[in-house]
Image (tube, helix red, strand yellow):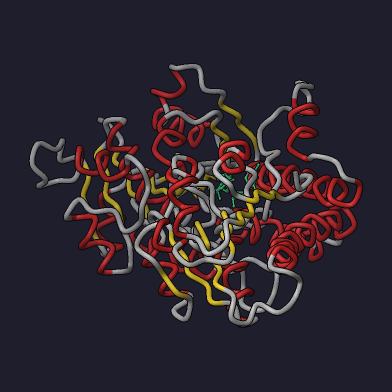
Amino acid sequence: MALKITVIGTGYLGATHAAAMAELGFEVLGLDVVPEKIDMLTRGEVPMYEPGLEDLLRRHVSGFEGSSGRLRFTMDFAEAGEFGDVHFVCVNTPQKHGEYGCDMSYVDAAFSSLAPHLKEGALVVGKSTVPVGSADRLTGLLPQHAELAWNPEFLREGFAVNDTLHPDRIVVGVNSDRAEELLREVYAKPLAEGTPFIVTDYPTAELVKTSANSFLATKISFINAMAEVCEAGGGDVAKLAEAIGYDERIGHKFLRAGIGFGGGCLPKDIRAFMARAGELGADQALTFLREIDSINMRRRGAMVEMAREALGGGAFLGKRVAVLGATFKPDSDDVRDSPALNVAGQIHLQGGQVTVYDPKGMDNARRVFPTLGYADSALDAVRGADIVLHLTEWREFRELDPAELAKVATSPVLLDGRNALDSSLWRAAGWTYRAMGRPSA
Ligand code: UDX
């Protein structure tokens, strides 16, 4: 009989995983403790903006017209325990308040709530990003008749559906052949398509995720460090990145200099990784991540200073600053630790009159930064602006007509904090275009 699957936690990771499991043909029960989320998902609505996810969900949510009916949602752990053969735990592991470590309270709560209801032979699969050693500890929360595996998730926001249905690798940390077999059954389709399947122990599986994110963060901060040197020495970091990227050992990806990385993963994951290394007495191995973090945070301040300088070097007081972009990356409505909002907030706190526009992140931005000004379009944000900051590289901004914007801006000065706009187009339309890590003309 086909395996029945539950997914505990229906955020970015869980909602996408639940819908993807239904797409692979399984009966799926999604569980969350937030009633509003369950109501929305049951109505076929996704609580965040993620391209393609709503369509995928509606193809499978039970009771939705034309759906497979394979996907349902609940708040009841007893129902989940009775239903599932394999339980994926996909809850959030945020940064602890006021310190670097990882807050495991949601993971622990999910395990404790599920444990008393697990069937004989049930497999619990952790997907959340956790400090090394967590799986070993969590085994202690499960009954003898259940098993644990760790299966980190590498999906990117904005590409969550595709990354989940067509992962570039599947990593499983297991303690038994049976756990491996069950996971081979769950992932039979991607495995048949040739997806690499890496079977390992718990600590390695946990570390694959934190080290992958640390490597990505390192790549971004490396190129941003080169941007700092370019700014000092007169070089062009975009050309430099293009040139070094042709070396296949380096590659072109994740070498876009700008205001740096943000979001709900990279910043908190490198901090939690450092904190865990400290607990294990291996702090020295990861002290370089402190530098990665500080280069990253420095770039936000550098953007603020670049804006100040472009405005004549004085205070921001009385200056009108248009900010294009609020989310931490395009194709997402996520503003968690968003470099764009951080820059906008700093300028606002220094007296600048900031007006933000973002294609999808307005509601979330208003919630976390209610005192900033907001406009309904890029054109409205730019109207009357003394300077325009491009801080999240949405396609919509690349498709703007610089000539039209030049007509409404008080002063046509554009700072590209993402190195993503076509400088020649903007300059041809009369703009002073400057980008981070590149010469001014
Ligand atoms: C990341 C990992 O990529 C993913 O594998 C993991 O599962 C979760 O964390 P995500 O947070 O969605 O995914 O964003 P990502 O695409 O990695 O971008 C992170 C940040 O880095 C964004 O703020 C982005 O703007 C920035 N970035 C990315 C750069 O500044 N330069 C680059 O070249 C690439």
Image position of 425 (left or right of 225): left
- Residues 295 and 194: in front is 295
Position of the C terminus by quadrant: top right
Q: Position of residue 200 (x, y in %)?
A: 64, 35
Q: Quadrant of residue 93?
A: bottom right
Q: How many marks?
A: 0
Q: Position of residue 223 (x, y in %)?
A: 77, 43
- Residue occupying image coordinates x 53% and y 77%: 353
Q: Position of residue 147 (x, y in %)?
A: 48, 47
Residue 187 against residue 400 in the figure, above or below: above
Image position of 435 (left or right of 426): right
| Residue 369 appears in the figure | yes
Q: Position of residue 291 (x, y in %)?
A: 83, 58
Q: Quadrant of residue 408?
A: bottom left
Image position of 368 (left or right of 20): right
- Residues 197 and 275: in front is 275
- Residue occupying image coordinates x 65% and y 48%: 433
- Residue occupying image coordinates x 85% and y 45%: 230
Position of the N terminus by quadrant: top left
| Residue 157 appears in the figure | no
Image position of 37 (left or right of 87): left
- Residues 293 and 286: in front is 293
- Residue occupying image coordinates x 42% and y 45%: 396
